[in-house]
Image (cartoon, rainbow, N blue to C red):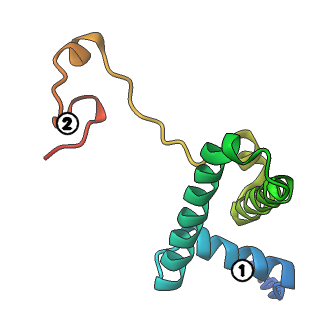
């Protein structure tokens, strides 16, 4: 009778500080805990403030602090982009699709498309 060789368990590797930081970012950007929801809401508020600045920027060009605010916003946007990249589970996939996770929708046939009605389940529309 032959015995199967025992598979040795791989030793557990402790997570480094960088991996813990990436896990924390992943939980904040993609989680549903109260802390994650507060973080996502604050990111939304900052994004709306940035949009308001860009809409108002033609009126602020003559202001002496315009460039400081503009460069600060650019640095903030870079930091957000870097944090989103680090929060991704696969950075190379994220670099190919930086706009976020795209879900593959089924394609509609011309017949289904012609029969499409709003609020129906045809062609992936939300059902009521």
Using residue 110 as the reference point, say whether residue 75 is left or right of it.
right
Judge whether 19 appears above or below 46 on screen: below
Using residue 57 as the reference point, say whether residue 36 is left or right of it.
left
Q: Who's the residue at 47% across and 36% down the image?
A: 104
Q: Who's the residue at 61% across and 64% down the image?
A: 46
Judge whether 71 appears above or below 114 on screen: below
Q: Nearer the viewer, mark 1 or mark 2?
A: 2
State the CA–CA distance, disc 1 to disc 2.
Answer: 61 Å
Q: What x and y, as percent, mark residue 33?
A: 47, 82
Q: Quadrant of residue 126?
A: top left
Q: Nearer the viewer, residue 64 or 91?
A: 64
Tag 2 secondary structure: loop
**Numbered circles on residues, count:** 2
- For label 2, the residue is 121
Badge 1 crowding class, 10 Å Cα cut-off, few under 14, some 14 to 19, many 20 or more, is: few
Q: Nearer the viewer, residue 49 or 40?
A: 49
Judge whether 119 appears above or below 109 on screen: below
Contact? badges 1 and 2 (CB < 8 Å)? no
- For label 1, the residue is 1
Viewer can see residue 74: yes
Q: What x and y, as percent, mark residue 68?
A: 85, 59
Using residue 98 as the reference point, say whether residue 33 is left or right of it.
left
Tag 1 secondary structure: loop
Q: Nearer the viewer, residue 15 or 95?
A: 95
Q: What x and y, as percent, mark residue 1?
A: 71, 80
Q: Who's the residue at 73% across and 56% down the image?
A: 90
Viewer can see residue 16: no
Judge whether 79 appears above or below 101 on screen: below
Q: Quadrant of residue 42?
A: bottom right
Q: What x and y, as percent, mark residue 60?
A: 72, 48
Q: Nearer the viewer, residue 14 or 53?
A: 53
In primary-sequence order, the first of circles 1 and 2 is 1
């Amino acid at each position: 009778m032959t015995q199967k060789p025992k598979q040795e368990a791989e030793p557990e590797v402790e997570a480094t500080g960088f991996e813990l930081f990436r896990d924390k970012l992943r939980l904040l950007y993609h989680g549903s805990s109260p802390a994650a929801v507060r973080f996502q809401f604050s990111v939304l508020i900052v994004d709306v403030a940035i949009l308001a600045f860009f809409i108002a920027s033609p009126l602020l060009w003559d202001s002496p602090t315009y460039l400081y605010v503009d460069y600060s916003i650019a640095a903030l946007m870079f930091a957000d982009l870097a944090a989103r990249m680090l929060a991704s589970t696969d950075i190379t996939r994220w670099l190919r699709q930086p706009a976020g996770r795209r879900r593959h929708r089924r394609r509609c046939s011309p017949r289904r498309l012609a029969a499409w009605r709003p609020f129906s389940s045809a062609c992936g529309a939300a059902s009521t």
